[in-house]
Amino acid sequence: MTYRSILRAALIACLALSACSKEKPYAVEEVSLAQISADLAAKKTTAVAVTRAYMDRIKMYNAPLNAIIVVAPDALEQAKASDKRRAEGKALGPLDGIPIVLKDNFDATGMPNTAGSFALAENIPTKDAEATKRLKDAGAIILAKANLSQWAGYRTTDSFAGSTVGGTPHNPYDLTKSAAGSSSGSGISMAVSFAAGALGTDTSGSITGPSNVNGIVGLRPTRGLVSRRGIVPITELQDTGGPMARSVTDVAMMLNVLAGSDAGDPRTQPADSHKTDYAKALNAGALKGARIGVLRPQGNAEKNTAPVFDAALEVLKAQGAELVELPVTLENLNQIGLEAEAYNFAHDIAAYLASAPPAVKVRTVDDLLAFNKSDPRESKISAIYWEEAAASKGDLQNPRYLELMEMIQRKAGPEGYDALFSQNQITAFVTVAGAPAGVIPADGTPRSGGRGEGPGSFTRNAAIGGYPILTVPMGNVEGMPVGLSFVGPQWSEPALLSYGYGYEQAGYKRVPPEAYKKAVAAAK
């Protein structure tokens, strides 16, 4: 099948929703993955009914949001297969029949994996990404592919919201504002109940950012806990996939399926020895007696978020946490991190494209640059990151690259967060996930400030060192959500999820968005 034929099949599937159905309707808005799982197990609903409900919502509300690129043509067939398994007493587990959306950089058979670029319009995989396979093996329904910052944000220093394939994503709390990146479509999809769960990817804040501005829960796991095989890459050093949902429990249930060693991704070799049942391990009392660091935000994140951050800290204290102020300024690793990424991207994208279908004509970063110059849909956007990657030639034995890798890993790890945790005797630290969403600038607008300048980034430093970040809703600032991030040592997901769970149960309750509904109602 070609890209266009798949889109036509998806459209037909959506139109079929208007046909008569024997299924009793199921209201999915703001219903947790855990609740849907329980209702399926109790035979209160069916996977077909749940899937139809999500497809209805996508059909009704996606237009002003640009969250979803394509609905899986076989979504209802997947749901019917799940219902058949349950009827026969052969359910595959708690995720059987649960609709999930994938960021459009995960390989999934039957749908293009475009990374938001027309250069990959015919990239229709013959094998699933390992994360996709694990979801399917657990019975989850791969419902749709979500929009993203093109190439997961690795293209230009100018403003470029979203992708040429999926358009500009819009924040459901205020359509004039950003949904952040790069996992924007996944974040929006969770905020507006387009699915029960979503997968995003994170190289340096790409799960944290959309979770922050869309009022949802997102986990960037320890690098190596979740396989990256079959994901369009930026850099092997920092990339990871991770779950996004509307509650900590839902994220933990997804992580149960996603976590584990994969021979196709050497970084995951230790994963099986660290994985556990994350949902069963959730402990609402985990904050009692926990020694938690407090990293005060700097720059834009500090200006408007101080009151809600202070309120969140009071909740943590009320739950028994011992808070330790961290009077530190993170080292700025942005510039040297970007320099290292250039080498990795050229190498890693060539490795990914080497196994792409024959219909995909680009195989290297040089091919991508040539495609962009020749394609009018892509040529309007600059590609400075790619130009730097092409100049590096992906030479991972280059002395400068080796110097960069030694430097940034040392500064992020032993001299960075490892030292922060050990010297302050803390098991995690909390900080503001980011500033509230800003107005979407026009594509091509030069970004303010110098490239890589400013204070150090807690998300980049965590990504370089391979540390996990859990982001949960913390409050609203002038009607826009902001998140609280928990950062811990490698493999500390059980503790981080429990800290976030304890805070979630006692703290701020997520307020669903309404602006997107008003926009649809006004357009009728």
Image (spheres, rainbow, N blue to C red):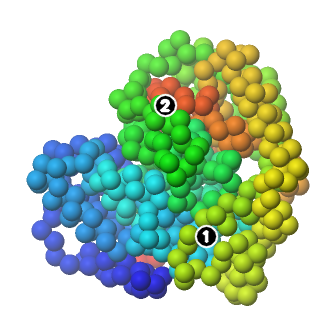
Direction from residue 163 to residue 139 in the image, left or right: left
Q: Residue at x 34, y 75 (%)?
A: 73
Q: Residue at x 39, y 44 (%)?
A: 257
The label number, if any, that marks residue 507 in the structure image: none
Q: Position of residue 335 (x, y in %)?
A: 85, 49
Q: Position of residue 357 (x, y in %)?
A: 52, 77
Q: Quadrant of the C terminus?
A: bottom left
The residue identified by callout 1 is: 354
Question: Identity of the amino acid at label 1?
Answer: Ala
Camera-nearest residue between 217 and 230? 230
Q: CA distance from mark 2 to mark 1?
A: 32 Å
Indicate the quadrant where residue 353 lies: bottom right
Q: Residues within 10 Å of mark 2 (few under 14, many from 20)?
A: some
From what the image shows, is residue 408 above or below residue 146?
Answer: above
Indicate the quadrant where residue 11 lies: bottom left
Q: Residue 73, can we see it?
A: yes
Question: Identity of the amino acid at label 2?
Answer: His
- Mark 2 element type: helix
Direction from residue 443 to residue 126 in the image, left or right: left
The residue identified by callout 2 is: 274
- Nearer-N-terminus badge (2/1): 2
Q: Position of residue 415 (x, y in %)?
A: 79, 27
